[in-house]
Every structure is written in C-alpha cells, then in structure tokens.
C-alpha cells in the first residue's frame, strides 16, 4: 500500500463517468452506487477539505483467481481506508471520509434489499460521484498509469479526505 498527497486541481470531474454507472450490470443494486447515493455537489464537498490523499493498494493475481482476487483486493483497500479514517477521527479529524475505487463489496451475500447492511462502513466509489480516475491519476504524475484490460495485477485506488 502506498499513499500520495493530492492537489485538488488534479481531480477530473466528468458527467460521462457517471453514465457508465447506468450501464453497469449491478446498477440499482448497490446502496453506495447510483441511483441510491445522495444527490450532492460532490466536487464542492471535496473542495471543502484541506487534505486529499490517494491510497493505492496493489495485488497480483493468476487468471484462475481473477474473480476472487478482484473482490478481495477491493475489500482490502476498503478496510485500509476505514482504518485510516478511524486513526484520523482519533486525532481530531472528525470529518475524515473516504471514497473507494469500484463498488462496495463488504457484504458477502450482496446488499440488503431494503437498506445498506453496513451504513457506517460502506463507502461510495469515486467513479459514482463523477471522478475520471484514469485522468486524475495521470494528473498526479506519481508513476501510475491505469490501463485496460487488467493483466496480472490489480491496482486499487482510494481517496481519503481530511
């Protein structure tokens, strides 16, 4: 895991990113994804924070383990972000919050039908709020380049605000 400070100017918000959510096979099934997330001006929310940090988690995989490692790597990063939020909270940063990369996978059997099973732990993906992750990481000039299709290594990117 690595952490990189981020300038607000590196963020790239694009409405077209949110359109991809609509075409996701899980659209409407996750409480932390559209159309269930709050209708807020997320760019404005992020700009209210003094510190932005990109947290990068790397995990290799074999082709036969792709699906399980995909979920595990998402959850590993998600838990690390929650740990960092807790540390910040305990150090007088009560408004610290994070955004995960990709959809929330905390619930092994999927999201609850009527409401989120883990409202205190679930986090919204930064793609769902309109951040073009590929362009944002490029703008940071930290030596990472997101490419598709993914081959051999998952890189998970989280955004920590405090």
Image: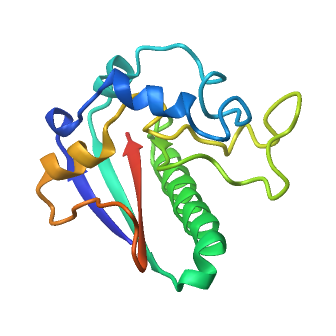
Q: Which residue is drawn at 42% across and 80% down?
A: 152
Whether residue 78 is visible to the viewer of this picture, yes or no, is: yes
Instruction: Tell me how the rendering is colored.
Output: rainbow
- What residue is shown at x 85% (from left), y 54% (from top)? 109
Residue nearest the viewer, comparing 109 with 20: 20
Q: Where is residue 57 in the image (x, y as percent from the top left)?
A: 42, 68
State the quadrant of the N terminus. bottom left
Q: Residue 114, located in which quarter of the rendered image?
A: top right
Can residue 129 be seen in this snapshot? no
Q: Nearer the viewer, residue 150 or 160?
A: 150
Position of 57 relative to 162 (above/below) = below
63 or 126: nearer the viewer: 63
Please state if 155 lies on the left or on the right of 31 as rendered.
Answer: left
Q: In this view, does 143 lie to the left or right of 41?
A: left
Name which quarter of the figure residue 10 lies in.
top left
Q: In this view, does 5 lie above or below 28?
A: below
| Left or right: 65 in relation to 16 | right
Residue at figure coordinates x 14%, y 33% from the top left = 9
Tag count = 0
Residue 162 coordinates in the image, percent (x, y): 37, 39
Residue at image position (15%, 61%) is 142
Q: Where is residue 151 in the image (x, y as percent from the top left)?
A: 39, 75
């Amino acid at each position: 895991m690595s952490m990189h400070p981020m300038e607000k100017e590196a963020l790239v918000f694009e409405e077209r990113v949110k359109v991809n959510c609509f075409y996701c096979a899980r659209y409407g099934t996750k409480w932390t994804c559209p159309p269930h997330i709050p209708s807020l001006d997320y760019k404005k929310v992020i700009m209210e924070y003094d510190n932005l940090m990109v947290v990068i988690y790397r995990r290799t995989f074999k082709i036969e383990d792709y699906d399980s490692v995909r979920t595990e790597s998402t959850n590993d990063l998600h838990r690390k972000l929650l740990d960092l939020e807790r540390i910040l909270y305990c150090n007088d940063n009560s408004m610290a919050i994070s955004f995960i990369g990709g959809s929330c996978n905390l619930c092994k059997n999927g999201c609850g039908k009527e409401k989120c099973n883990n409202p205190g732990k679930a986090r919204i993906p930064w793609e769902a709020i309109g951040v073009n992750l590929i362009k944002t990481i490029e703008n940071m000039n930290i030596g990472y380049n997101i490419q598709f299709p993914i081959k051999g290594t998952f890189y998970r990117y989280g955004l920590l605000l405090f």
